[in-house]
Amino acid sequence: MSEKLKAYLEEISHFLSGREEREEILAEIRSHILEKAEQECGQATEASLARVIAAYGPARRVAEKYLDGRQIIAPAYNRYLFRYTALLFAFHFALTVVAVVFKKSFLMFPILYVPSMGPFDALFYLPTALLFDLGAVTLILYLITQSKKDVKLPWPKFSIDIDEMKTTGRTIGRIIGLIAMTALTSAALYLYIRYGTIFFVNFNLPQRRPIFTPGAGQWFSLILIGLWGISAISLAIKLVASSPWVDAVEKALSLVLIGLAFRQPFETAFAIPLSENLIRTIKLGLTITLLIICIFVASDFIKAVIRIGRKRLAK
Amino acid sequence: MDPEISNFETEMNRGFLQILALALLEKDMYGYAMVRTIRDLGYEVEENTLYPLLRRLEKNGWVKSKWDVSEDRPRKFYGITDEGRSLRTELLGIWRKQVQILKQLTEENSHV
């Protein structure tokens, strides 16, 4: 048999693996191609077979026509995939926050395990959790689809709805945001270059003093300048090219920077005398504030990832 | 051909090809012969669509098949079954009704 025909049939065979009637399908295609090459080109040469094979179509497309088109997730349940994943991830995220703040572990075998972890570990744990949640929801929707039952799943209104996102007035908002963020970043940079920190007590008075020690001051100042700078750059890019990738990268970098803020030991960060109780209260307040910011940033990050996924699916 | 029209044609062909195959298979035929016959009738059919369709029709009991190995090249012959004939009658009835509706609408539109 011609090498070309053999390779073509092997490729179709690869895509049909698991089908018991595979050999018969291949025999029929082989017979058709050889007969067509002889009838329409005189004889079955390598060149004539190549023409007939090209006309028959790419191996994957040919094989797909024999597959019964069984769906992994029925079209009616497609929309639940991202919404349920977002909900599950929100739950996962909340438990992660609790695990970080209260140093607790959660185990609901085999569906959930959130170990006690530090804020920095959480940054690496959450993407894995997101993928797990996506897989878990996919599996449930797959099982519902395969059951062929008309299961009416609830459609919660309070989670992310990309379709309802407003588009009007965005440009004006972005311009105002860009001006504000650029001014803020520039002013902070100026202060940082001049004083080595942007955090002061009594900034307008002669007895102006930095709040943090030089090392901590530099650390927190650079993180804040970084966050504002990323925001300004993102707004500038979005004015000329709106893409969910811009949001995704911006939010991912912001999450990393916020995570870095937790790496600075807080108890020894202050350059001004503060009681232990007050430091503890400030630390708790700041941790909660940062985690809330994290939730919003992570939520925007998920939205951006969903939009990227949807665009790819649409393509 | 305009890709949009081509898409519509593919959609329309799906049903048409089933009736066509059931109509052709009153006499036993193998795939390549069916492709040639359809082409001689002035219609083009994608070869890689015909064989999976025949397989589906066979799976549902509307056509039956048999390998003929008497010649150098084995050929799989298909023929219609009694269930296939009943289905063909039903499908032709639907098709006639559709044609009638379209004809009536086209005539009405031409008088507007």
Image: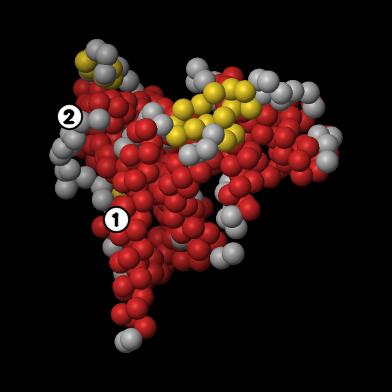
Residue A192 visible in rendering: no
Circle 2/circle 1 CB separation < 8 Å: no
Residue type at mark 2?
Answer: Asn
Q: Left of A106 or right of it: where is A142?
A: right
Q: Left of A194 or right of it: where is A145?
A: left
Residue A211: which numbered mark, if any? Answer: none
Number of labels in the image equals 2
* Secondary structure of residue under mark 2: helix
Give the residue drawn at x 81%, y 43%. Answer: A41
The chain letter under disc 1 is A
Give the residue drawn at x 35%, y 27%. Answer: A135
The part of the image, by quadrant, that contains residue A4 is top right
Is residue A78 positioned above or below B111 on the image?
above
Residue A234 percent location from the top left of the image: 46, 56
Residue A159 percent location from the top left of the image: 21, 45
Q: Mark 1 points at which residue?
A: A163
Which mark is first along the chain, 1 or 2? 1
The part of the image, by quadrant, that contains residue A288 is top left
The part of the image, by quadrant, that contains residue A54 is top right
Establish whether labels 2 and 1 are both on one chain.
yes
Residue type at mark 1?
Answer: Asp
| Location of the N terminus of chain A (image quadrant) | top right
Around disc 1, counting alpha carbons within 10 Å, would you say few (fewer than 14), some (14 to 19), or many (20 or more)?
few
Spatial CA distance of label 2 from label 1 is 47 Å
Q: Left of A212 or right of it: where is A152?
A: left
Is residue A31 positioned above or below A241 on the image?
above
- Foreground label between 2 and 1: 1
Residue that sits furthest to the bottom in the current view: B112
The chain letter under disc 2 is A
Q: Name the residue under label 2.
A: A277
Q: Nearer the viewer, residue A190 or A286?
A: A286
Give the residue drawn at x 31%, y 69%. Answer: A168
